[in-house]
Amino acid sequence: MTERNDNQLNTELLDGELPDPRFVDDRYLAWLYDENPDGPAVQAEADEDGVRVAHYALVPQTYRNAVGPAPFLFSLNAVTKRGTQRKGYWSELGLRVFEEATAQGKQLVIGVPNEKSTPGAVKYLDYRFLGPMPVKVVAPTGAGGGFTHHAVDDAFLASAGFEELAASVDQHEAVHWTNSYGLEQLRWRLARPHGGYTVHVDDDLVVVSTRSGLGPLPMAVVLKLFPRGPRRMDEPLSARRAIAAVCRHHRAPAAVYAGFNALVKVRGISPPHRLRPAPLNLVVHSFSDAVPQETFRLDTFEFLDLDAY
């Protein structure tokens, strides 16, 4: 019998407890944990009688503020097998990955647990609850002209045009914290297996989207709004024309946007709680006095900064 590696074992556990098309094979975890240009994931697991029963991972990310860049992490894939939830594996694995993250010099971890997991994250792992991410449904207004649309595939990510686009983003002013996307980070993030992304471009914005659903309706999903070139906080852009272009491209009656962006303003309505994507509760845990947990603030945080799509 061929011995299965950790990515295979963790994929099987995740697929059994949190079924999702991402877990159809271990390609997703190999990309997420092993190919990240910011470094490999910090992971911990627990087995019982040779069976994987718990897993937790932190994925490195680079954030920046007005002072400069810092090594952060994103918390994800905290899962325990049914029947073992009361054995304390989740908090045990959390303490293990936190210890390793501290040893590696990471400064803070951001997570988006669901409502059921949020109290445990705060109580047992000393996360600070920042509140739920806002969710908006935005109806298109106008024709959304002026944008070009690029299906994300290997050829696009390897092209000179993509390198030019990547060089034009992540130049804006940051006061508080924002995820920082250099060329290799952005190329890696958009190469997610089964991503189904489209990149929309005009002179002012680079927009990343996909197509999904909100209840029974097909919807465009706006994953990221990148201002192009240098831009100041006191001159934010409007997302109106971009969202019209995204909806028109995906032939969707409206778009879903979650999060907030200090440089791009998105106006819409809040959908009923039962129709909102989940998990979307924001929590943070600091490992360093250089990033105080109690005063931590984000300038921008959107779907592409987490693992929902």
Image (cartoon, rainbow, N blue to C red):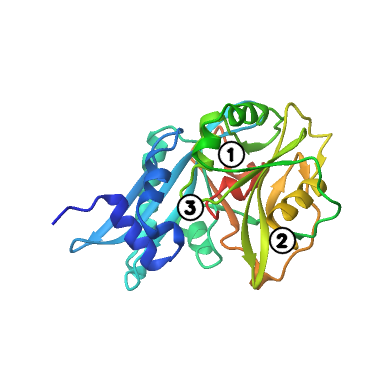
Amino acid carrying label 1: it is Pro
- Residues marked 3 and 1 touching at CB (< 8 Å): no
- Which residue matches tag 3? 194
Which residue type carries mark 2?
A: Ala
- Which residue is drawn at the image coordinates 62% and 57% (left, top)? 211
Judge whether residue 61 can be spotted in this image: no
How busy is the neighbourhood of tag 2: few (under 14 within 10 Å), some, or many (20 plus)? many
Residue 13 percent across, percent down from the top left: 34, 62
Between marks 2 and 3, how big is the CA–CA gap? 20 Å
> How far across and how far down the image is residue 216, in percent?
65, 73
Q: Is residue 233 left or right of residue 150?
A: right
Asked whether disc 2 touches disc 3, contact meaning CB atoms under 8 Å apart, the reply is no
What residue is shown with label 2? 252
Q: Quadrant of the N terminus?
A: bottom left
Return the disc, 1 or 2, that comes first in the chain's sequence: 2
CA gap, disc 3 to disc 1?
Answer: 36 Å
Task: Report the residue marked by disc 1.
Answer: 292
Q: Nearer the viewer, residue 258 or 199?
A: 199
